[in-house]
Amino acid sequence: MSEVKRFKEKITVQGEGENKKAAFASALNKIQSKVLKESEDVILKIEPIDINILSAEKQVVHEKFLFFFFPRERVSYSVSLEIEVEITRFDAESVQYKEVSKAADDSIKIPLINKRV
């Protein structure tokens, strides 16, 4: 009997990057690891349903070499997202395992000769 269950959860993730696309990609890549940390079941599918942007920031840093030379601007983006995901899980604890006994192999394996003594 299969124990496949579907749940909806809201997950908050943050991401940073040198451009907008990289910041969103960084945040979305953290979804899977966050879901796997919270659950001990086997995760079959993680599907985002809705994305809510909690905050989006653009940080500009003006730099100069030796206070005068080579002025440049470094831009970094950071986003904080609340994502509603539908998670399909399989309950591995409900599986009935049968116990199989096997005698121990008492021979010694020699890796260079590939023969048993």
Image (cartoon, helix red, strand yellow):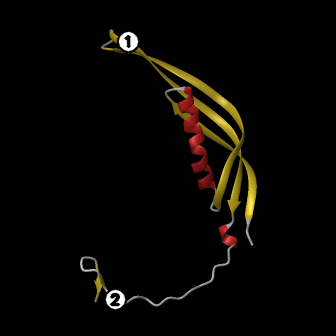
The residue carrying pointer 1 sits among few (fewer than 14), some (14 to 19) or many (20 or more) residues within 10 Å by Cα, namely few
**Location of the C terminus (image quadrant):** bottom left
Above or below, comparing residue 91 to residue 38 in the picture: below
Q: Position of residue 77 (x, y in %)?
A: 54, 26
Q: Is residue 94 left or right of 79 when viewed as pictured?
A: right
Q: Amino acid at mark 1?
A: Pro
Residue placed at 52% from the left, 22% from the top?
A: 59
**Residue 84 lies in quadrant:** top right
**Disc 2 marks which residue?**
107
Task: Identify the amino acid type marked 2.
Answer: Ser
The label number, if any, that marks residue 71 in the structure image: 1
Residue lying furthest top: 68
Question: Where's residue 36, x and y in %?
Answer: 60, 54
Q: Residue 56 in the image: x percent, y percent?
A: 62, 27
Q: Is residue 106 above or below residue 81?
A: below
Q: CA distance from mark 2 to mark 1?
A: 71 Å
Q: Out of 62 and 45, give the one closest to the viewer.
A: 45
Q: Secondary structure at mark 2?
A: loop
Could you tell which of marks 2 and 1 lies nearer the N-terminus?
1
Packing grade of label 2 (10 A; few <14, some 14-19, many >=20) is few
Picture residue at 24% right of the left edge, 76% below the top: 112
Q: Which residue occupies 59% across, 33% down?
A: 24
Which mark lies nearer to you, 2 or 1?
Answer: 2
Disc 1 on helix, strand or loop? Answer: strand
Residue lying at 51% horizontally and 30% vertically, measured from the top left: 17
Locate the N terminus and report the quarter of the image it occupies.
Answer: bottom right
Q: Is residue 51 left or right of residue 65?
A: right
Q: Position of residue 109 (x, y in %)?
A: 31, 82
